[in-house]
Image (cartoon, rainbow, N blue to C red):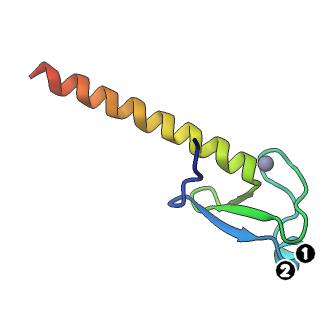
Amino acid sequence: MITINSDIFLKQSADRNILENVTKYCSKCYNEFSEEDFIYYDVESYNYLCKNCACCISEELQTKQECLLDECETEASLF
Ligand SMILES: [Zn+2]
């Protein structure tokens, strides 16, 4: 099960202020946010994403980290 990486994504609910002054759309899939939707602020790229996209990116990062861990273990076993 994929959890959204809370080190990277700050969960917020889309209030009127964000929708009117910051963004109305997910910066990845361009879905329009509605008021009260949960949206995810990416602290690395400074974008707002919908839940689906935040999930997707978290999943990619998790997979990458697992690959890195595997590599470390393989190298360690050479010694
Ligand atoms: Zn999206």
Mark drawn on residue 20: 1
What is the number of the mark on residue 77? none
Using the image as rendered, state which of residue 45 and residue 50 is in the foreground.
Answer: 50
Q: Nearer the viewer, residue 47 or 78?
A: 78
Residue at 57% x, 37% y: name it: 60
Mark 1 falls on what kind of element?
helix
Classify residue 3 as left or right of residue 22: left
Question: Residue at left 73%, top 53%?
Answer: 51
| Res. 66 image quadrant | top left
| Left or right: where 66 falls relative to 31 | left
The image quadrant that residue 40 belongs to is bottom right
Residue at image location 78% in from the left, 52% down from the top? 27
Q: Which residue is mark 2?
A: 17
Query: Residue 19 appears at what percent x and percent y?
Result: 87, 71
Q: How many marks?
A: 2
| For residue 21, above or below residue 40 | below
Dot 2 falls on a residue whose secondary structure is helix
Left or right: residue 30 versus residue 10 is right
Taking the view exactly as shown, the residue that stands out farthest to the bottom is 17
Amino acid type of the residue tagged 2 in the rendering: Asn
Q: Position of residue 58 (x, y in %)?
A: 58, 46
* Label 2 neighbour load within 10 Å: few <14, some 14-19, many 20+: few
Q: Residue furthest left?
A: 79
Q: Residue 75 in the image: state x and y as whole percent.
A: 21, 24
Looking at the image, residue 10 lies above or below residue 49: below
Q: CA distance from mark 2 to mark 1?
A: 5 Å
Q: Quadrant of the N terminus?
A: top right
Query: Above or below — where is 63 with respect to 18?
Result: above
In the image, farthest residue toward the top? 78
Residues marked 2 and 1 touching at CB (< 8 Å)? yes
- Mark 1 residue type: Glu
In the displayed structure, does residue 33 sit left or right of residue 62? right
